[in-house]
């Protein structure tokens, strides 16, 4: 009975969390639109992106806004391939493109943040849009996000989607990343922002200067998006919105292997210690819930409680996840592939507890750099 009660409480808490996410998405709604929000500077930090940088810039050159309203700033982060050369060719051909070389590695700031900070300091635009070099922006990207910067708005987040492919691994990665974005969007809907993706993030240059940029977490290898978002909210620099329109979504290439997938998740989890206490509490609850589902069969064998009990709670989790994701994919006009959903749900049970524990060490490899406790170890 005690075990059954514990499973009931954990599952009820999980379903309640899903319900709050669902309602948070409903609260996003439509926002006012500014007629003259200001010019835009798109900052692209790039390291070893020779195969992607041309495509990325090409999508930006097709933006459906006047050319004089935006500029593109590529900051090469000590690439070891032809990224800098290819970026410079773009700059030579198109006057809107500017190329900068990131400063020598700084002891007080992680490389990517140093690259972004340099680009922001040189930006002429009132609005800063950040985009990863392995992403592509749709033609209406700036046009959809820029008008949301009405007076008092400091930042706008939006979707980063893996292309809809037949490859099962890509479909699983899409659902995994998308589920996090749904949580982040819902939190913004509740005015409790804590999660964003720097591959599609916009903010005013004034807000960046007002909160002293990345100061306070500058050494962390990750966090230029969500930790900065939290800082804007904490410092009261302005309102934070989420652009729900699928035309505001950028696309990102899937990771090339499961190894890269897990290294990316370790990088994301390495900054969890900086999160607000209420987020840590929720994450702890989910960690123990997933761990309990892991232990369901061993406990069944040891305690001889009815087998249908853990299976019922697992089915309840799956149904809740499906309920939320079905709403989410409709927002971005994407299909929900059932085989990918089932695979992603099973994968979650395995890797969320593991990543949660390994993420505490902050040890991962990203862009040929090693990190320890979330900070650069070797280059």
Image: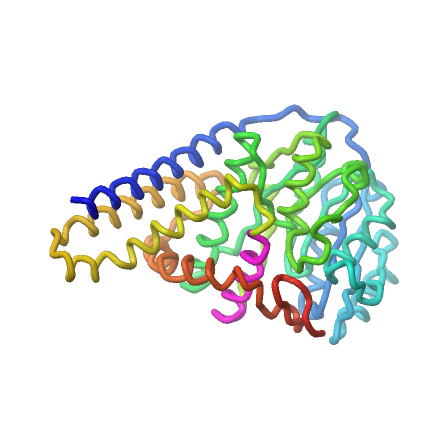
Q: Where is residue 199 in the image (x, y as percent from the top left)?
A: 64, 52
Residue closer to the observer: 368 or 343: 368
Residue closer to the observer: 283 or 153: 283
Tell me where residue 118 sits by quadrant.
Answer: bottom right
Q: Where is residue 85 in the image (x, y as percent from the top left)?
A: 81, 71
Say which residue appears at 57% left-offset and 30% top-offset: 191
Q: Where is residue 203 in the image (x, y as percent from the top left)?
A: 72, 40
Say which residue appears at 57% left-offset and 51% top-offset: 273
Say which residue appears at 58% left-offset and 41% top-offset: 194
Quadrant in which the C terminus is drawn: bottom right
Residue closer to the observer: 42 or 241: 241
Residue 26: tell me if it is visible.
Answer: yes
Total residue callouts: 0
Say if 329 sits above or below 43 in the image. Answer: above
Say if 40 sits above or below 90 in the image. Answer: above
Please say whether residue 270 is one of the residues in the magenta stretch: yes
Left or right, 301 with reference to 142: left
Residue 147: tell me if it is visible.
Answer: no
Residue found at the very far front of the displayed protein: 2
What kind of secondary structure does the magenta stretch mostly adopt? helix
Residue closer to the observer: 107 or 330: 107
- Which segment is the magenta one? 256-272
Left or right, 201 with reference to 184: right
Q: Where is residue 300 in the image (x, y as percent from the top left)?
A: 16, 57
Please say whether residue 107 is one of the residues in the magenta stretch: no
Quadrant in which the N terminus is drawn: top left
């Amino acid at each position: 009975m005690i075990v059954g009660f514990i499973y009931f409480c954990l599952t009820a808490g999980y379903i309640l969390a899903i319900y709050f996410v669902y309602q948070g998405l409903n609260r996003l709604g439509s926002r006012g639109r500014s007629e003259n929000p200001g010019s835009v500077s798109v900052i692209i930090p790039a390291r070893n992106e020779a195969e992607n940088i041309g495509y990325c810039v090409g999508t930006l050159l097709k933006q459906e806004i006047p050319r004089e309203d935006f500029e593109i700033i590529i900051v090469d982060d000590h690439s070891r391939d032809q990224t800098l050369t290819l970026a410079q060719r773009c700059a030579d051909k198109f006057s809107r493109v500017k190329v900068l070389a990131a400063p020598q590695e700084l002891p007080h700031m992680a490389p990517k943040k140093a690259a972004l900070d340099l680009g922001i300091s040189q930006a002429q635009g009132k609005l800063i849009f950040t985009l990863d070099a392995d992403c592509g922006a749709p033609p209406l990207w700036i046009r959809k996000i820029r008008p949301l910067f009405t007076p008092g708005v400091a930042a706008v987040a939006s979707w980063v989607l893996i292309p809809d492919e037949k490859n099962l691994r890509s479909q699983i990665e899409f659902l995994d990343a998308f589920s996090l974005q749904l949580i982040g969007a819902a939190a913004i809907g509740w005015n409790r922002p804590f999660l964003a993706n720097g591959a599609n993030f916009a903010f005013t240059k004034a807000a960046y200067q007002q909160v002293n940029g990345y100061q306070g977490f500058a050494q962390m290898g990750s966090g230029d998006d969500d930790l900065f978002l939290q800082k804007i909210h904490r410092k009261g620099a302005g309102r934070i919105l989420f652009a729900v329109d699928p035309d505001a979504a950028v696309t990102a290439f899937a990771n090339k292997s499961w190894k890269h997938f897990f290294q990316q998740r370790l990088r994301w989890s390495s900054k969890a210690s900086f999160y607000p206490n209420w987020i840590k509490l929720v994450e702890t609850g989910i960690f123990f819930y997933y761990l309990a589902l892991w232990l369901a069969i061993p406990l069944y064998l040891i305690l001889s409680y009815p087998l249908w009990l853990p299976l019922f709670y697992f089915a309840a989790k799956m149904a809740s996840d499906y309920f939320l994701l079905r709403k989410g994919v409709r927002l971005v006009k994407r299909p929900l592939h059932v085989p990918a959903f089932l695979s992603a749900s099973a994968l979650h049970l395995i890797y969320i507890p593991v990543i949660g524990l390994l993420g505490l060490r902050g040890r991962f490899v990203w862009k040929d750099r090693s990190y320890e406790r979330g900070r650069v170890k070797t280059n």
